[in-house]
Every structure is written in C-alpha cells, then in structure tokens.
Amino acid sequence: MIQVADAALEFTKIQELVYELKIADVMTTEVITIAPDASLREAKEIMRTRRISGLPVVRGRELVGVISIEDIIKALESGEMDVSVGAKMTPNVTTLFADESVVQAVNMFSRYNFGRFPVVERTGGLAGIITAGDITRGLLKAIELDYRQEEISKYRASHIFEDIPSDHTSLVLRYEIKARDFARGGEASSRIKKALTRLGVTPKLVRRVAIATYEAEINIIIHSTVGGYMVVDIWPERIRLRAIDTGPGIPDVEQALQPGFSTAPAWIRELGFGAGMGLVNIKHCADEMRLQSEMDRGTNLEAVFHLLPARE
C-alpha cells in the first residue's frame, strides 16, 4: 500500500477543459477536401488560392488519404504533375475521433508534431479537421460560456448536509466502466464534475477531482479485462474516489508511479492513450492516494480530497 500526502498541484480552468471538452467541440467542420481522381494541378491551385498546406482526400464522405504541399513540390521536381491526387497522396492517415477528449488531441500533437489532424466519426466518415489554433480558440470560448452559465445559474445544493438531520450524512455516486470503451471515455468523470459543481464544491477542487477521475476512468478502460467501476463518496469534510478494476494487476506498484512508465500495449499508445502519466496526475491532484494491486486479481485505487477552506 502506498500513502501519499504531497500537496496537490494547482490545476487551472484550461487544464480542466482539456480533459472535459470533446474534439468535436473545438474542431473546424467546414473542411476543404479533394477527390482522389482529381488532378495534382487542381490540388495545387486549391492550396494556392485558399492558402492552405494540405487537403484531406475523400471518396464520398470516406477519408482515403491526405495530399500536402510537400507532395506537390516533389511531383513538380520529378515532372509528375499530370497524375491524379490518389497517385501521390499519403494513404495511411493518422486521425482523431470526434468524440475523443481534447487531451487526446494535445497528446497527438505533442507525439507527432503535425500541424493538423483529420477528425473522423467512428463510422469512418470525415467530420472535420483540428489544429492547435482550433484548440486554443475552443478553450477560450468554453471558458467564456462557462463563466456566463455560472453567472446565470446560481443553483447550488451546498446546504444539503445541513438540511438532512443525521449523525453521519454522505452521498455515494457509482459509475460502471467498460473495458476498451474509448468512445465513452470521460463520461463518468464529466458526470462527477457536474454533481460536485451543483453541490457547491469550489471550482479549484472540482478541477482536481475531475482530472483524477478522468485518469482513473481511462486506466480502467485501458487495463481492465472485463471492466470495473468508480465510486465517489462525498462527506461534508472530504471526497473519496475509489476506482476498482479486474485487470491483470500491476507487477510493480512503485514502478507504475514513475512518470512515463506504462504497461499499455503499443496499439493503445498509438491511439494517444497509455502515456504513463495517469497515476502521476492522480497523485498530484489528490491530498492522499492509496494504490493496491494483485496480479490476476485487479487494482484498487483510492484518492482523498479534503474540503477544508484552507486547501482552497
């Protein structure tokens, strides 16, 4: 068992929104595309007039490749401009899903250092395109909307513990998590955030809990064999997160707490998950953290957040 009593780091509104927002919330939906049977000259002219450096290549709505200004330059140098876009495009395109969290886009930009990523639906159709600028603009807009909603709606249930006569009053929230269900990754943490906000928990503490629950949720999705669940217990003086999964277990708990260490398979890391920072981020967010794991039995994580004014 590991007991952590380090001071939790300060997490900003920007960091909170990076976890909460979906790529569909910030991406550009009006995308200029080109068909694979179009000519390279046509692609070059579109890029010149629209002042863009690349075009998604689509057949109907299906993304089949990307043609870039670099591809055009190579074709010019070799005298191969009289061919189709499909002959010179890059067919195997790294994409993002519209329903993924913005944090996945941030991870992918950091990993590949690309200027943009095509965004697709789970069915394969092109949904949009995302750049680092789209993320910045989307975050600023979300902050503005969040502030306005906070001003408009002052609903709080912060006196709920005072209104219920009891010697020991608490709220228990439980969320089932399915293994490998990346499409719904972040749903439970988003619900928890909304519940805590309505209960009047301070924004700074809500951010810390939201980030910790997101990381715990994704860990269950990645590592569990059949799924797991998260339970959030809320008392007047503290919040406790318990994340339980039936995964293969952690061989070395101390090693798992080292930044960058990951047991996620390569295909999951290619999706932008499993970077080895989940437990580290939870540790930074929480006031206390306990982690127990047994091979072939699963992993139990407990994180405690104090609701003391001094911490806020």
Image (cartoon, rainbow, N blue to C red):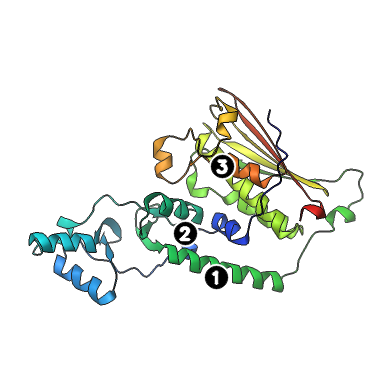
Q: How many marks?
A: 3
Q: Residue at point 66% right, 47% down?
A: 285
- For the residue labelled by badge 3, is the local secondary structure a helix, a strand or a loop? helix
**Residue 170 in which image quadrant:** top right
Which amino acid type corresponds to the residue marked 2 in the rendered image? Answer: Ile
Q: CA distance from mark 2 to mark 1?
A: 14 Å
Which circle marks residue 278 in the picture?
A: 3
Q: Which residue is mark 2?
A: 23
Q: Of label 2 and label 1, which has the lower sequence position?
A: 2
Which amino acid type corresponds to the residue marked 1 in the rendered image? Answer: Lys
Q: Residue at point 17% right, 70% down?
A: 42
Q: Is residue 22 left or right of residue 190?
A: left
Q: Are marks 3 and 1 in contact (CB under 8 Å)?
A: no
Q: CA distance from mark 2 to mark 3?
A: 20 Å
Q: Are marks 2 and 3 in contact (CB under 8 Å)?
A: no
Q: CA distance from mark 3 to mark 1?
A: 27 Å
User: Residue 187, can we see it?
Assistant: yes
Q: Is 102 or 174 nearer to us in this picture?
A: 102
Q: Which residue is mark 1?
A: 141
- For the residue labelled by badge 2, is the local secondary structure a helix, a strand or a loop? helix
> Where residue 274 appears, x then y in whole percent?
48, 40
- For the residue labelled by badge 1, is the local secondary structure a helix, a strand or a loop? helix
Q: Is residue 213 above or below residue 134?
A: above
**Residue 127 in which image quadrant:** bottom left
> Where residue 24 appears, x then y in whole percent?
46, 61
Q: Residue at point 28% right, 66% down?
A: 53
Q: Of label 2 and label 3, which has the lower sequence position?
A: 2
> Where residue 63 appears, x then y in whole percent?
29, 57
